[in-house]
Image: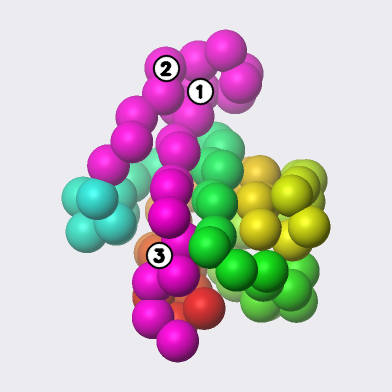
Amino acid sequence: MFLRYKKLQIVLGSSVKGAVEIANTADLIGRSLTRATVQFDEEISREAFEGVSNVDVLRVNDNNRAYTLQIRGEMNGLMNILFWI
């Protein structure tokens, strides 16, 4: 399965009230950030994010179709898993 997400929202800084950037996946590789919200077209199990480096699942919404993630440091692990979910 390849790129089933329909929206990737990035929140810069430690607050949800921070600046929001919506960008292409390729533009985000190598960046550091705090939070990301990913919305999928289909249900995705929480286990898909287990073992992804620097990523913690903070919240699951919309019947496993939207995830709020905490990222520490580079987001290469997140970008890689999004290509293969």
Q: Is residue 57 left or right of residue 9?
A: right
Question: Badge 3 local density, few (<14 within 10 Å), some, or many (20+)?
Answer: some
Q: Position of residue 53 (x, y in %)?
A: 58, 68
Front position among marks 3 and 1: 3
- The residue under the point 55% across, 52% down is 39
Query: Reading the chain from its start, which is encountered first: label 3 or label 1?
Result: 1
Mark on residue 19? 2
Q: Which residues are magenta?
A: 1-23
- The residue under the point 51% across, 23% down is 13
- Please tell me whether mark 2 sits on a helix, a strand or a loop: loop
Q: Is residue 67 left or right of residue 60?
A: left
Kindly identify the amino acid type of the residue bearing the numbered disc 1. Gly
Mark on residue 68? none
Q: Is residue 65 left or right of residue 35?
A: right
Q: Position of residue 2 (x, y in %)?
A: 39, 81
Which residue matches tag 1? Answer: 13
Q: Are marks 2 and 1 in contact (CB under 8 Å)?
A: yes
Colour theme: rainbow
Quote the CA–CA distance across marks 2 and 1: 8 Å
Q: In the figure, 35 relative to 19: above or below?
A: below
Quote the CA–CA distance across marks 3 and 2: 20 Å
Query: Reading the chain from its start, which is encountered first: label 3 or label 2?
Result: 2
Check the image and name the residue furthest to the top: 17
Which residue matches tag 3? Answer: 79
Asked whether residue 41 appears in the rendered view, the answer is: yes
Give the dominant element type of the magenta stretch: helix, strand or loop. Answer: loop
Query: Reading the chain from its start, which is encountered first: label 2 or label 1?
Result: 1
- The residue under the point 50% across, 15% down is 18
